[in-house]
């Protein structure tokens, strides 16, 4: 497993280097969001080339292709032709001068290394010749449900924002959670962990724990909401009435 992991890390760093070179041309680093969706697919392709596939590995490979391509296409379409995302504008301002050089390691290689941690729960699916069992069936079900939940939430939001700029989306899945897309992503990675769990590698739990941290504290819900209140009238009341992450009933 270790040699496979090292190979994947090298590929990820090389991919990050390509993304950084593109950012020098574009003078914009936002495309790293789209790259994030491709890291797990790239890592899985490395594994597929090295190991024969059984039934559970075929199912997972199909899943990771769906997950990666959906997220890549969604993020690329959302960001295409727009100025640099506000998150990265702040990072750029805080790291001048020479941000265009610093961005190699504080944006692109940082993403590559975080994606490398996520691969900790993916690699055993390919290397350990796992068989289908009740736990893996539960994991597959949770992962596919999370993917569908996230995709529906993203579709509902993009459709709403077409005619409701700067308004609060509180319909559909967004009625019960302020970030249902993040909740779907949360389910995806805990589902993957259950698929890969075989009792041999307790450290594989680092993968869903990292994703949970990112979604809750680092680049997800809290970071997004730190600026959204000033941009969208009514969002403060939405915060008061609606669960931040896990779907729940409206607060009275």
Image (spheres, helix red, strand yellow):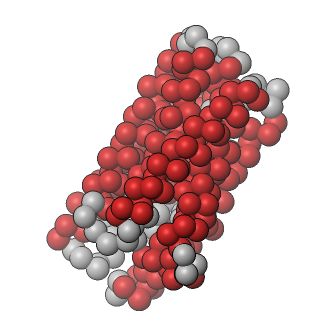
- The residue lying toward the viewer, choosing from 67 and 79, is 79
- The residue lying toward the viewer, choosing from 107 and 183, is 107
Above or below — where is 9 with respect to 150? above
Query: Which residue is at a point 62% across and 34% down the rendered structure image?
Result: 8
- The residue lying toward the viewer, choosing from 210 and 2, is 2
Above or below — where is 124 with respect to 232? above
Work out whether residue 228 can be spotted.
yes
Above or below — where is 18 with respect to 127? below
Give the mark count: 0
Measured as percent of width and height from the top left, residue 62 is found at 44, 25
Measured as percent of width and height from the top left, residue 172 is found at 33, 59
Going by the picture, which residue comes out furthest to the left?
A: 163
Query: Which residue is at a point 65% across and 40% down the rendered structure image?
Result: 9
Query: Which residue is at a point 32% across and 47% down the rendered structure image?
Result: 73
Instruction: Tell me the quadrant of the picture where the N terminus can be found.
Output: top right
Work out whether residue 56 can be spotted.
no
Measured as percent of width and height from the top left, residue 107 is found at 55, 62
């Amino acid at each position: 497993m270790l040699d496979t992991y090292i190979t994947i890390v090298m590929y990820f760093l090389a991919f990050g280097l390509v993304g950084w070179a593109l950012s020098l041309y574009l003078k914009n680093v936002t495309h790293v969001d789209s790259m994030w969706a491709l890291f797990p697919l790239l890592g899985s392709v490395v594994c597929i080339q090295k190991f024969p596939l059984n039934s559970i590995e075929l199912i997972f490979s199909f899943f990771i292709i769906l997950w990666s391509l959906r997220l890549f296409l969604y993020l690329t379409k959302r960001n295409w032709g727009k100025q640099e995302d506000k998150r990265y504008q702040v990072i750029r301002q805080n790291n001048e001068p020479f941000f265009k050089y610093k961005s190699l390691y504080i944006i692109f290689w940082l993403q590559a290394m975080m994606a490398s941690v996520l691969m900790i729960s993916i690699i055993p699916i390919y290397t350990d010749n796992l068989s289908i069992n009740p736990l893996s069936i539960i994991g597959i079900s949770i992962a596919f449900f999370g993917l569908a939940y996230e995709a529906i939430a993203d579709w509902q939001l993009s459709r709403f924002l077409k005619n409701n700029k700067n308004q609060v989306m509180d319909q559909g899945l967004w009625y019960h959670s302020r970030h249902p897309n993040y909740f779907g992503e949360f389910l995806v990675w805990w589902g993957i962990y259950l698929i890969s769990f075989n009792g041999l590698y307790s450290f594989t739990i680092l993968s869903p724990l990292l994703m949970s941290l990112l979604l809750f504290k680092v680049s997800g819900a809290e970071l997004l909401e730190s600026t959204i209140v000033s941009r969208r009238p009514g969002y403060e009341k939405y915060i008061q009435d609606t669960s931040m992450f896990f779907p729940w009933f409206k607060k009275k």
